[in-house]
């Protein structure tokens, strides 16, 4: 083998390792990542005690060790029916826990909703090497009937729901809202969340962290095997560099690409993304925005122009995003006394 060919082979292996490293370590490192949820702001905090509600933890919905959920029940629960808000945790598909979102779940519950945080099997080289975004999305889908049944058992009839999340949780929330909504036990009235990958087009993912105003052009003659390895790890389907040239990869990524499932009459959405995100592809969020627009969906899109994945540098705009979520809930899933 010539030195040039050997160098190319080593280069390809290096980039493959880098992108798998991104999935395992950088995504995994976001287990400690907290989206800029302003829990210290009284506007977005609940005064939580027995007069506000009760928490029921670690309820099983499947046979897996991680198949547990927490349920937050409003105090009194005297209404005929309730809306359910599910909020899925961040952690890059490799870390995080439902307990991380206790504050926002209590906050929504204090507004009069039944709320739920759900764990899912995390990818791990040692313990769960077969876990991926698709298997996690199936677990979330399977959990919904159990969450609703438990709420019923505790005296709260659920007749509609909203679903949101942060980062990885936002991705899983969008998948449920758009891919799985037709099979949901109750109607999905809206979805919301921040910085979750919604689609996987190679031309967007080669641009992670770059200047958002200067997109990198896809070169069909270039070796993108590293991105192919990342897409393989996330989807559970084998993706090769050649598939980028033919477009075949798009169908293989569809099951975890919420944007590809959006159609007319899909759930309204409130979303937030950071322009300088180095963990997920910011430009993919622009495709999400365009697809929502093309299908006539009522949506609000917040671009945090000074922030990366944590949305840490646009606190005022993030507060506007939180208020908009409440506005959409008031329109599409209002809390009504004596509702039927």
Image: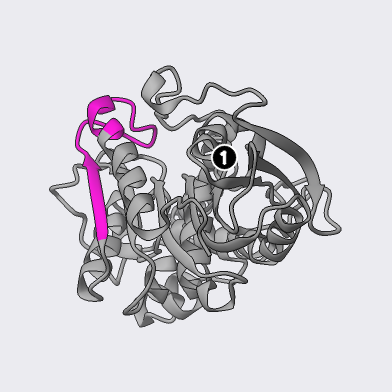
Q: Residue 222, located in which quarter of the rendered image?
A: bottom left
Residue 49 place in picture, x, y as percent: 64, 22
Residue at the far left: name it: 213
Magenta segment includes 311: yes
* Above or below: residue 275 compared with residue 164: above
Question: Residue at the location (41% across, 42% down)?
Answer: 279
When the figure is inspected, residue 299 is found, relative to residue 164, above or below; the finding is below
- The magenta region covers 299-319
Q: Is residue 257 above or below residue 339?
A: below
In the shown orientation, is residue 334 left or right of residue 75? Answer: left
In the image: residue 217, left or right of residue 27: left
**Disc 1 target residue:** 91
Q: Quick one: SS at disc 1?
A: loop
- Mark 1: few/some/many CA within 10 Å (<14, 14-19, 20+): many
Q: Position of residue 71 (x, y in %)?
A: 69, 44
Tell me if residue 85 can be seen. Answer: yes
Inspect the magenta stretch and tell me whether residue 35 lies in it.
no
Colour mapping used in the image = one colour
Q: Residue at x 42, y 57 (%)?
A: 333
81, 92: nearer the viewer:
81
């Amino acid at each position: 083998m010539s030195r040039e060919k050997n160098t190319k082979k080593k280069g390809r292996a290096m980039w493959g390792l880098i992108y798998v490293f991104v999935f395992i370590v950088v995504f995994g490192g976001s287990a400690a990542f907290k989206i800029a949820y302003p829990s210290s702001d009284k506007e977005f905090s609940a005064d939580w005690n027995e007069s506000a509600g009760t928490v029921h933890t670690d309820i099983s919905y499947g046979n897996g060790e991680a198949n547990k959920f927490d349920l937050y029940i409003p105090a009194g629960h005297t209404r005929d029916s309730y809306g359910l808000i599910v909020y899925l945790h961040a952690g890059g598909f490799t870390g995080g826990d439902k307990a991380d979102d206790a504050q926002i779940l209590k906050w929504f519950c204090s507004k009069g909703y039944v709320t739920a945080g759900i764990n899912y099997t995390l990818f791990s080289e040692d313990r769960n090497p077969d876990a991926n975004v698709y298997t996690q999305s199936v677990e979330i889908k399977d959990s919904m009937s159990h969450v609703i049944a438990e709420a019923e058992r505790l005296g709260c009839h659920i007749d509609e729901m909203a679903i949101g999340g942060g980062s990885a949780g936002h991705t899983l929330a969008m998948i449920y809202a758009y891919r799985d909504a037709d099979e949901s036990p109750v109607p999905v009235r809206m979805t919301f969340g921040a910085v979750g990958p919604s689609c996987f087009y190679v031309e967007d993912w080669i641009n992670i962290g770059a200047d958002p105003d200067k997109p990198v052009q896809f070169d069909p003659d270039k070796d993108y095997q590293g991105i192919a390895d990342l897409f393989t790890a996330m989807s559970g389907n084998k993706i090769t560099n050649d598939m980028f040239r033919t477009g075949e990869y798009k169908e293989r990524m569809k099951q975890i690409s919420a944007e590809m499932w959006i159609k007319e009459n899909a759930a309204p959405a409130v979303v937030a993304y950071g322009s300088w995100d180095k963990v997920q592809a910011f430009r993919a969020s622009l495709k999400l925005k365009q697809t929502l627009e093309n299908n006539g969906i009522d949506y609000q899109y917040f671009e945090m122009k000074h922030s990366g994945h944590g949305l840490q540098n646009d606190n005022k705009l993030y507060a506007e995003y939180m208020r908009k979520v409440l506005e959409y809930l008031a329109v599409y899933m209002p809390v009504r006394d004596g509702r039927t």
